[in-house]
Amino acid sequence: MASHPENFRWKQWSLEDVADMLSQRFPYSYIWIIKSSRMHLHKFSCYDNFVESNMFGAPKHSTELGAFKHLQSLLTNAFSAAQSLLVSQNNKYSVDRDYDLSKMDICPTYTTNGCPEKDNIIHSTIYLGMPSLKDSLSITVIGFSKGCVVLNQLLYELQEAIKDKDIQSFLANIKAMYWLDGGHSGGCDTWITNPEILKAFALTGIAVHTHVTPYQVRDIMRSWIGEEHRKFVQLLKKYNVKVENQLHFSYEMPSLDNHFQVHEVF
């Protein structure tokens, strides 16, 4: 990003800097940032590893179960690697690498951001939790800008996901989802407006948070984004989903600066 002739202006929003910023905002959470599988023209993020996309990253959503499995595998491997790293760096802790859950000396109570409460760790055991073990932790899934296509794909797959025993426990650990100023170059489907998909989503009990800026929802050249966003929120509220909906920088002109700054205000 720093060497790109245009994008160097947004260097402060690189993946590494955003990870550092979020870790400071949420010091008791584990932060995992997933990079897009490719960048077209070093500018357009494409999440082909989660959803089939065209050259510019506009999604072609389907109900085929794939994104859930990929996300579950990524987090499971990430937690395993982090667990091993923590153990190797801290010899004063004693950890059973086989995770014999029947002998695990921790209390199964976690804070809302997925971290075990300090008083619940007995004998200084290091244990990050297991994404696929129900009630092991609390997962919040956040999508920003083009990354929101991943959240949308998860909703498309939901009907198949609840039939898969391996995915059910992982799904039960997802407590909240954040859509941060979603947008892409396609002419529709920036926000899900299919009633049947949203009805199924409502049954999960997952809390929904949408944080948008004029850069996306007031773009006169892409007016469908704002229209779809309103319908998305309206339908979820109709189906009794707990929705937090905020428009930031509403009195300012649409700008890419404010689009990125949603990271600091959500």
Image (spheres, grey):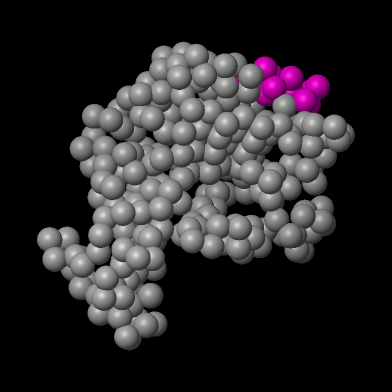
- Between 31 and 256, the one lying in front of the other is 31
Left or right: residue 178 versus residue 223 is left
Q: Residue at x 68, y 23 (%)?
A: 225
Q: Nearer the viewer, residue 108 or 23?
A: 108
The vertical placement of 151 against 119, above or below, is: above
Task: Identify the main secondary structure in magenta.
Answer: helix
Q: Is residue 252 left or right of residue 96?
A: right
Determine which quarter of the picture holds residue 62: top left
Horizontally, residue 59 falls left or right of residue 153, namely: right
Say left or right for 69 vs 31.
left
The one nearer the camera, 108 or 131, is 108
Q: How many marks?
A: 0
* Residue 44 against residue 83 in the figure, above or below: above
Tell me the quadrant of the picture where the C terminus can be found: top right
Picture quadrant where residue 219 is located: top right
Point out residue 19 in the picture as x, y percentages from the top left corner. Answer: 59, 60
Task: Name which residue lies at 52% across and 19% down.
Answer: 237
Task: Tell me residue 144's x, y (percent).
Answer: 61, 42
The quarter of the rendered structure image containing the N terminus is bottom right
The image shows residue 9 at horizontal and vertical percentages of 82, 56
* Outermost residue, front side: 119
Magenta part of the chain: 218-228
Q: Is residue 74 visible?
A: no
Q: Residue at x 66, y 48 (%)?
A: 263
Residue at 79% in and 59% down = 8
Q: Quadrant of residue 228?
A: top right
Whether residue 149 is in magenta: the answer is no
* Coordinates of residue 112 in the picture (x, y in percent): 43, 48
Placement of 29 over or under 180, stated as above or below: below
